[in-house]
Amino acid sequence: MTIISNKLDKALMAHKKGLLKEAGELYRNIIKTNPSDCNVLHLLGALCHETGNIVEAEKYLNKSIKLAPDFYQALNTRGILKKNIGKIEEADLDFRAALTLVPDLPEVLTNLADTCRIRGKINEAGRLNDRAIKLAPNLGTAYNNRGAIERERGNLQKAKKAFQTALKLDRNLDDAAINLAITLNMLGQSKFALEIAKTIVTKLSNYAPAHNCLGLIYFDLGKNKDAKNSFENACWIDPNYAEAQSNLGNALTRLNRNKKAQDHFNIALGLEPNNPDFWSNKAANLQTENRFSEVIEACNKALIIDPNHRDARWNRGIAYLASGNLLDGFADYESRWLLPEFKNRSFDSQLWTGQNIENKTILVYSEQGFGDSIQFIRYIALLSKQRPKAIYLETHKSLSKLFKAIPMISKIFTKGEILPKSDYHIALMSLPHQFKTTLKTIPKTIPYLGIRTKSKYKFAAKNKKKNIRVGLVWGGRKTHKNDQNRSIKLKLCQPFLKIPNIQFYSLQIDRSDEFGDNCSYIIDLSSHLTDFAATGSILHNLDLVLSVDTAIAHLAGSLGIKCWLILPFAPDWRWLLDRRDTPWYPSVTLFRQQKRNKWDDVIRQIASALKRLNT
């Protein structure tokens, strides 16, 4: 017995010093002579888990628990292993079994709290974790879990404080440092988040979660190549790290490496088939390939697992809309308020969801971009048929003068101004859902916007030799998340810029650095584009607007002005698929990219169509 005890002491000492290979050999030698030693089996299982040998770890822990069913330490360790490999329900059972044996063990309480959080049982998770902290006020892991719970609740400041407390209690609690970095990034404190993440990666170069954390921050900063490299490092260290595999798929999607991205989503789902995040991420990738029936199928799988999964409902909504199913699409589109990039505002008035508003006042507000506001302002006419006492509109300053021409609007307010009291309120882009819009019931009165004053700009004086006037927009807002796909370079337009008898006018408010040798073919009107009303008056002097997917195209369509719209391979949902026209704007013709990142065919089609205009 003394010999075995001495061997165990040596093994424990080696294990504590991080000499895992030596410790493993000593544990195995003890088991050879005493195969029923449940304690050593447990220790060897824990060591195998540390070294990433999951199969062996599970085997030894199972043996230990079979020999001693009331061995709560082994149940807890196996629960941690199960949680780490994504078997959350099995981990939950192990933690609950351990607590049946020892009800007030803080470590197990906080472990169970974490599985409850992962399973979406946030309130139970909070109660369990609070109990753990009450029993052990200095338990760093409990504060780490409290931070994760608060983050799930959307309480980012509370989460930040909890992670900081965890690190004060245990400065070597690396998972808390990782969580703090992620939370700071979510709070917009990306600089500090990046510093922490880089420090953790330097300290723990072989720790996959550290690289995954750094990748997430790079991803949110739009540094997609750096994100890809970090996620690849995490996957190389731990090929069974399902979250990193899925994140790598997301980064590859952004880099337009869609087939490779699908491989990693499939690996992630092979490891954790019941993870709704992975199904939703895969759906977002399929969406970039216009495979909308598969997008809907993947989202439905996510929603079966988690009926409240916000990203899956959002992605499904976009797929429905792009497929032409506007009724279900706009219903799912309401899930946008659950996403961090959409800020749901609070008002003293009641949300309008179809109630009788006759003789009542209602505030409509633009919650998204210029183009969205121009497209959906048409619904004010439908709203006015509900016979409200007044319709107030809050919108962007550059749109206010344009929208003043709408007689049904009682008063317009720009963002930041004090708003009037009203009985009801609604976001502008929620009106299609409330009016149960289908392709057949889109309000088609065109134009639905008007320009009160004519432009003072004298087009004819600029070039009397050219009879056809074409406004050109080749790039959108550079900060737009899809700008790399929707915008083109001006140099690509050269095949049609030199067509005789056509004068091109730049309607860009930036990108003048791209003019180069093309300045002799284009007249820059940027100084005249002071707001959308001024821009609209200029459009009325043109024969055609040629634009990528920007607000200018929406403006032209709303005014009934002829517009040719240049679309990427995976266009925004509103332009649908496989059609040259759009039910939103009869005056708009669509020119679609047939292969991702290949604009040559589209440019040739446009050049040919422009030449026909010139004959």
Image (spheres, helix red, strand yellow):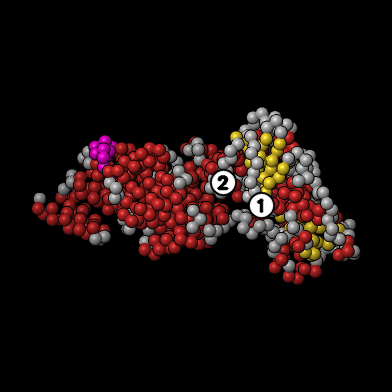
Residue 326 seen in this snapshot: no
Taking the spot 22% from the left edge, 41% from the top edge, the residue there is 71
The reply, left or right, for residue 396 in relation to residue 344 is right
* 252 in magenta: no
Q: In the rendered image, which residue does mark 2 sit on?
A: 343
Q: Nearer the viewer, mark 2 or mark 1?
A: 2
Q: Main secondary structure of the magenta part?
A: helix
Q: Decide which of 506, 361 is in the foreground and name it.
A: 361
Alpha carbon distance from label 2 to label 1: 29 Å
The spot of residue 507 in percent (x, y) is 75, 59
Mark 1: secondary structure: loop
Q: What is the count of numbered marks?
A: 2
Sequence-first tag of 2 and 1: 2
Q: In the rendered image, which residue does mark 1 sit on?
A: 569
The spot of residue 117 in percent (x, y) is 40, 42
Residue 311 seen in this snapshot: yes
Density class for disc 1 (Cα within 10 Å; few <14, some 14-19, many ≥20) is: some
Q: Which residues are magenta?
A: 97-106
The reply, left or right, for residue 197 in relation to residue 503 is left
The spot of residue 593 in percent (x, y) is 69, 53
